[in-house]
Amino acid sequence: MCLYIESIVYTTSEDGTGFGLTIVNEIVEAHGGTISVVEGGNSGARFEIRDLDTVE
């Protein structure tokens, strides 16, 4: 199962803003890539960044 991340604002920290994944998504998209969340095995999630523009 693979979900595209468009905008996620979530935190469990009292001092957190919850903008971490949103900021990462903006950076990845600015470089032509995509970020998705996939099953992380035993527990949690794994985030995959793909198709980034490369410099030759």
Image (tube, grey):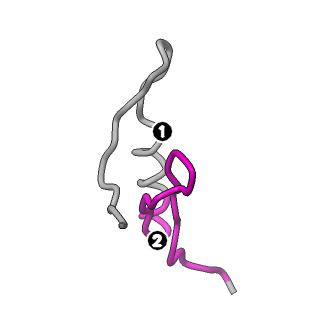
Q: How many marks?
A: 2
Q: Is residue 25 above or below residue 13?
A: below
Residue at the disc numbered 1: 20
The earlier-in-sequence mark between 2 and 1 is: 1
Q: Label 1's element?
A: helix
Q: Which residues are magenta?
A: 28-55
* Crowding at mark 1 (Cα within 10 Å: few <14, some 14-19, many 20+): few
Viewer-closest of 21 and 46: 46
Q: Amino acid at mark 2?
A: Gly
The C terminus: image quadrant: bottom right
Q: Are marks 2 and 1 in contact (CB under 8 Å)?
A: no
- Residue 30 quadrant: bottom left
Q: Residue at x 45, y 22 (%)?
A: 12
Q: Label 2's element?
A: loop
Q: Position of residue 23 (x, y in %)?
A: 45, 45
Q: Position of residue 7 (x, y in %)?
A: 30, 47
Seen as rendered, the residue at the extreme front is 42
Residue 39 within the segment the image draws in magenta: yes
Seen as rendered, the residue at the extreme top is 14
Q: Amino acid at mark 1?
A: Gly
* Crowding at mark 2 (Cα within 10 Å: few <14, some 14-19, many 20+): some
Seen as rendered, the residue at the extreme bottom is 56
- Residue 5 quadrant: bottom left
The N terminus: image quadrant: bottom left
Residue 27 within the segment the image draws in magenta: no
Q: Position of residue 3 (x, y in %)?
A: 33, 62
Q: Residue at x 43, y 54 (%)?
A: 25
Residue at the disc numbered 2: 33
Q: CA distance from mark 2 to mark 1?
A: 17 Å
Q: Residue at x 51, y 73 (%)?
A: 50
Q: Is residue 34 above or below residue 41?
A: below
Is 37 situated left or right of 3 in this image? right
